[in-house]
Amino acid sequence: MLLPSGYGKSVGYSRKKKEMHMIQYFKIENGRLTSVTNPEDAEIVRVVAPSSIELEEVSSLTSAPLDLLSAACDKDERPRFESDDGVHLVVLRVPHVDNESDIPVTTVAFGMVLTAAHVVSVCSVDAPVWDAINAGKPRIPPVDNRLPFFCAIVMCIARLYLKHLEDIRREADAAEREIHDSMRNETLIRLLNLEKCLVFFTTSLRGHEPIWPRIRRLQAGEMTEDEKEMLDDVQVEFKQAHDLAEIHSNILSGMMDAFASVISNNLNVVMKLLTSITIILMLPTLIASVYGMNVKLPFQDSPHAFLITMGMSLVLSIGGVMIFLRKKLF
């Protein structure tokens, strides 16, 4: 991950090991995820970067159509919702800390296939969704209560977006404090990478907007009033995350333009100072050059010729400094 000059220090992201193929089995007990060793006892199957053989095994276990499981494996898949014969596919974009990229946080596709008895999550990387769900305070609804369960998962994803947006804002504030006296491009590059994160966020969050009306339309006859309110809450949370991402992106774009001017101005100030010093040092050099000529010069026969020339150099230098100070060139 870029962690260009301090993103990890400010925000606290840590490097993880390279993603591995993984299948985990869970069931819900007392509102929490509990790992199970026997796949037959599982209600939730978590699949990370699966091979085709692993997908076939999961399909056989859960009766989830293989084509739906395969569709969720593409990390660039767009958000969408499909329903066929009581089996639902939901593909969402979730935040992912990419340790091998210059961009601190990107988004990847996170697919869920909901069958009559199982929920299968498929992702090309080890996304932190289930860990965040289990660490959260709200209890997880039972899997057979599918819409409340789905809303709990999606609400957690929305909060992951909000958490990363807060981290990006803090990192941008830290970069802003550093750049006032900076003449280097590293801080500007950090801001550029943060802006790329926000582009991923705004694009992904905008892609979720058509999902909620489609769920309402396809599940209209099955949804209770409470379930409709849950879906409204999810939609509001995603809208808030989208609005925040756009606000931060606009602010960051303006900051980058302003900071580019600040860096250029800081460099101009240094160049002005160096030019002023060069002019002041040129005055004694001029006197020394004149008195180095092999011609008859004033005071050349005086025993105090050296002191006189040094005094003239000093007077001219002090006069130049005073003039530059009055003109505020120092």
Image (tube, helix red, strand yellow):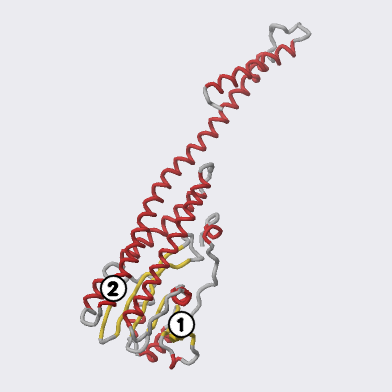
Badge 2 local density, few (<14 within 10 Å), some, or many (20+)? few
Badge 1 local density, few (<14 within 10 Å), some, or many (20+)? many
Residue 139, compared with residue 318, is above or below; it is: below
Residue 298, compared with residue 250, is above or below; it is: above
Left or right for 94, reference 219: right
Residue 253, compared with residue 80, is above or below; it is: above
Specify the amino acid type for callout 1: Leu
Task: From the image, state whether disc 2 or disc 1 is nearer to you.
Answer: 2
Residue 311 placement: quadrant: top right
**Residue shown at 26% from the left, 84% from the top:** 84
Instruction: List the single residue furthest toward the front.
Output: 226
222 or 68, nearer to the observer: 222
Quadrant assignment for the C terminus: top right
**Residue shown at 51% from the left, 51% from the top:** 174
Left or right for 261, reference 239: right
Instruction: Estimate the x, y position of residue 245 in percent, counting from the top left.
Output: 37, 58
- Mark on residue 229? 2
Specify the amino acid type for callout 2: Glu
Q: Earlier in the sequence, mark 2 or mark 1?
A: 1
320 or 229, nearer to the observer: 229
Instruction: Estimate the x, y position of residue 206 in percent, counting from the top left.
Output: 31, 63
